[in-house]
Image (cartoon, rainbow, N blue to C red):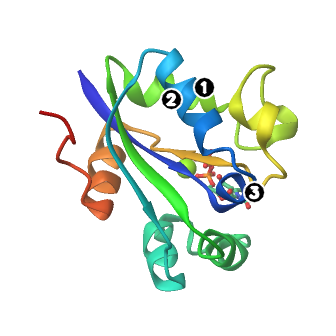
Amino acid sequence: MDRTLMMIKPDAVRRNLVGEVLRRVENAGLKIVGLRMVHLSIEDAQEFYRVHAERPFYASLCKYMSSGPIVAGVLEGEDSVRRWRELMGATNPAEAAPGTIRKDLAVSLEENSVHGSDARETADQEIRFFDLKLPLRG
Ligand code: UDP
Ligand code: MG
């Protein structure tokens, strides 16, 4: 069993798609073991995405990610990092496979509705960022 960090990004929260995304997570058999709505400050977004600090889209991405609340969650399951990214689909919704969240729900390359960690080490780091390590179950 391993864990990954998911975010439901501002564009999806704004369009009332929180339930739709969580339903897809649960239908895929991934366990939601932590969940929290937060409104990131611009500084929070800059820190979370600092790996992209040199990329041309960084400033716009950080502004967008702090433009409204997001839902951050921890998903648990065998191979959870890969399985969640598969459900999400490719970064660019135009290239995402049919049936994926980004293909079905995303607005644009930037406003692509969801985030998922890209490796186990990144997942540990991203979960620590949100302090969502403790499962909210008995
Ligand atoms: N992004 C963007 N323009 C790009 C590439 C990425 O606006 O050309 C945004 C998009 O919201 C993406 C995020 O930056 O989800 C992080 O990029 P990354 O390459 O890590 O994609 P992801 O891991 O989210 O699929
Ligand atoms: Mg990434």
Using a 10 Å C-alpha cutoff, classify the residue at mark 2 as few (fewer than 14 neighbours), some (14 to 19) or many (20 or more).
many
For residue 35, side relative to residue 1 (left or right): right
Q: Position of residue 137 (x, y in %)?
A: 18, 35
Quarter holding the C terminus? top left
Q: Secondary structure at mark 2?
A: helix
Residue for badge 2 = 84
Along the line of sight, the residue nearer the viewer: 104 or 118: 104
Q: Is residue 137 above or below residue 43?
A: above
What's the distance in space between the residues labelled 3 and 1, CA to CA? 17 Å
Amino acid on which disc 1 is placed: Leu
Amino acid on which disc 3 is placed: Glu
Q: Is residue 130 above or below residue 77?
A: below
Residue for badge 1 = 87
Residue for badge 3 = 111
Q: Earlier in the sequence, mark 2 or mark 3?
A: 2
Residue farthest to the right, as pictured: 94
Q: Position of residue 14 (x, y in %)?
A: 71, 60
The residue that appears at 65% across and 55% down in the rendered structure is: 13
Residue 138 shows which numbered tag? none
Q: Secondary structure at mark 3?
A: loop
For residue 57, side relative to residue 22 (left or right): right
- Whether label 2 touches label 1, CB < 8 Å: yes
Amino acid on which disc 2 is placed: Trp
Along the line of sight, the residue nearer the viewer: 2 or 32: 32
Q: Position of residue 103 (x, y in %)?
A: 80, 32
The residue that appears at 31% across and 63% down in the rendered structure is: 129
Q: Position of residue 87 (x, y in %)?
A: 60, 25
Q: Is mark 3 within 8 Å of ligand 1?
A: yes
Using a 10 Å C-alpha cutoff, classify the residue at mark 1 as few (fewer than 14 neighbours), some (14 to 19) or many (20 or more).
many
Q: Earlier in the sequence, mark 3 or mark 1?
A: 1
